[in-house]
Amino acid sequence: MSGTPSKIPPAPWRSSVDALLWLHPATRAARGALPAQLAARAGIAVTIGGLISYREGPVGPYAEVFGAPVMLSGAPMLSHVAFMAVDSAASVAGGRGNWALPKELARFDGDPGRPGAVTARGDGWELRVTTTARARRLPFLVTMRAAQVWADGQVRTFAVRVRGRARLARVDVEHSVASPLADWLVEGRHLPVLASGRQDVSPARPAVSDRG
């Protein structure tokens, strides 16, 4: 795992990525995972899950797994990232400092964002994701948004844009141990996209309803 930098690179972060992104219906437990500041914004009961390999970027290469348990009202593809784990201390520091992301350290076996099997392990959880993908690649562009709660209680939002090429895939998710993530990243077969290209993460801004 890479070390923590003496200075956190500020947003925006621009990275070269291979990303596996999938959706599935949110569980009842996932719907209750929102912080109090966001509970009234709960919208469509859909979870976003992802495994990403950062090939190049502000803090170097690293692997990531995340879960956004439920969509929020207020903007297209708006969610709250309730879980995120990486194998880079520099990424942990940058994610917490720039975007209030709940990043923790994990270990990865396999190559996230590519077909095949990947295992991610952290404190009290272990996740295995097996991916198969079609050969045909198509142009791909998606913009996702996240609303996070800072230590001062303020809600700020930021955008994540992935542009490149993608192919349809199939993913099988399983938890190897009794895991607190089981209600957020549901076991079973899901239909994801496997995207390769550039990811841009914007600076965080106060949410519209929080601006004075």
Image (cartoon, grey):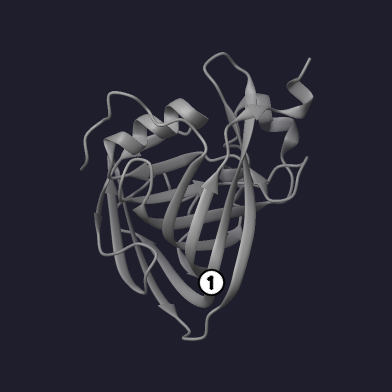
Q: Quadrant location of the C terminus?
A: top right
Residue 38 point in image, percent of width and height: 67, 30
**Res 39 quadrant in image:** top right
What secondary structure is marked by label 1? Answer: strand
Q: Farthest residue toward the bottom? A: 135
Q: Is residue 168 above or below residue 135?
A: above
Residue type (three-letter) at the residue carrying disc 1:
Arg
Q: Is residue 196 above or below residue 95?
A: below
Residue 58 point in image, percent of width and height: 38, 41
Seen from the viewer's position, the closer of residues 152 and 28 is 152
| Residue annotated with mark 1 | 165
Residue 24 point in image, percent of width and height: 59, 61
Residue at 39% across, 64% down = 113
**Res 48 quadrant in image:** bottom right
Residue at 48% across, 76% down = 170
Residue 125 point in image, percent of width and height: 31, 46
Residue 40 visible here: yes
Q: Residues within 10 Å of mark 1 (few under 14, many from 20)?
A: some
Residue at 33% across, 44% down = 86
Q: Quadrant location of the N terminus?
A: top left
Residue at 57% across, 33% down = 203
Tally the marks. 1
Residue 192 visible here: no
Seen from the viewer's position, the closer of residues 28 and 143 is 143
Left or right position of 97 against 69: left
Q: Is residue 150 above or below residue 121?
A: above
Q: Is residue 27 above or below residue 129?
A: above
